[in-house]
Image (cartoon, rainbow, N blue to C red):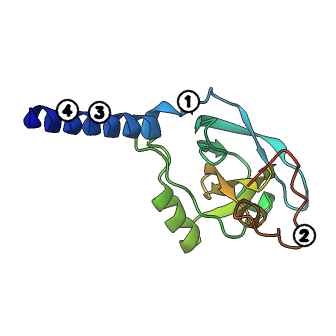
Amino acid sequence: MGRILVVLLLASAVLGGAGMWYLQVYGYYDVLPDQDSIGLTYAGEDAASEVAVTGFEGIDANSSPIRFRACFTVAEPASAFAPYDGATPLNAPGWFDCFDAGAIGAALEAGEAQAVTAQANLVYGIDRVAAIFPDGRAYAWHQINPCGTAFFDGDPVPPGCPPPPAEVTP
């Protein structure tokens, strides 16, 4: 009887773990349809403008505002767009193989790519950031900005941040 209980406990733990892994890696992500443009913020502008892109591949999920990842090619140089300070690419699921956060982050640190603002405060406290390489390859992700970091931690937002909307709670 004891062995049966142990086997049942182990089997339920393995099944639960496998289910949780599947949901985190595959279950919540949606593959985005091909797009011929993406919003990027030009230098000196406050709002994003639609910029033509080719080869778009993207994923997103409704479960979190920071699960967006995209790979595409843009014809305009990175210098045309507003720079973004503190860009940190977030890991993508292994099956989304066009996006390598480690390689993108290393290229940003080495100056081989430039981080630009795609869209600031896409959702309160969340920016869409892009890294653009000289050959036009570009990668985009969502990142929590300093206003969001403070707000989501329950701290007062820093000076210069827009007031948080009433419907967003930390």
The three-letter code of the residue at mark 2 reads Gly
Counting residues from the N terminus, which is met first, the one under dot 4 or under dot 3? Answer: 4
Residue nearer the viewer, 34 or 94: 94
**Figure label count:** 4
Mark 1 crowd level (few <14, some 14–19, many ≥20, 10 Å Cα) = some
Q: Secondary structure at mark 1?
A: strand
Q: Residues within 10 Å of mark 4 (few under 14, many from 20)?
A: few
Reply above or below: 137 against 35.
Answer: below
> What residue is disc 1 on?
31
- Whether the residues at callouts 4 and 3 have beta carbons within 8 Å, the answer is no
User: Residue drawn at (64%, 64%), measured in percent from left and top?
Assistant: 87
Find numbered disc 4 in the image and state the secondary structure of the residue it sits on.
helix
- In the image, taking residue 5 as reference, residue 161 lies left or right, namely right
Give the residue at x 85% y 60%: 43
Amino acid under disc 3: Leu
Q: CA–CA distance between discs 4 and 3? A: 10 Å
In the picture, the disc for residue 15 is 3
Residue 5: give x, y in percent of width and height.
16, 34
18 vs 122, nearest the viewer: 18
Q: Nearer the viewer, residue 87 or 34?
A: 87
Q: Earlier in the sequence, mark 3 or mark 2?
A: 3
Q: Nearer the viewer, mark 1 or mark 3?
A: 3
Disc 2 versus disc 4: distance between alpha carbons?
A: 56 Å
Q: Which label number is shown at residue 8?
A: 4
The quadrant in which residue 72 appears is top right
Q: Nearer the viewer, mark 4 or mark 3?
A: 4
Marks 2 and 4, the one that precedes in the sequence: 4
Name which quarter of the figure residue 94 lies in: top left
Q: CA distance from mark 3 to mark 2?
A: 48 Å
Nearer the viewer's eye, disc 2 or disc 4?
4
As measured in the structure, the alpha-carbon distance from the residue carrying label 1 to the one carrying label 2 is: 35 Å
Query: What is the C-alpha distance between the residues marked 4 and 1?
Result: 36 Å
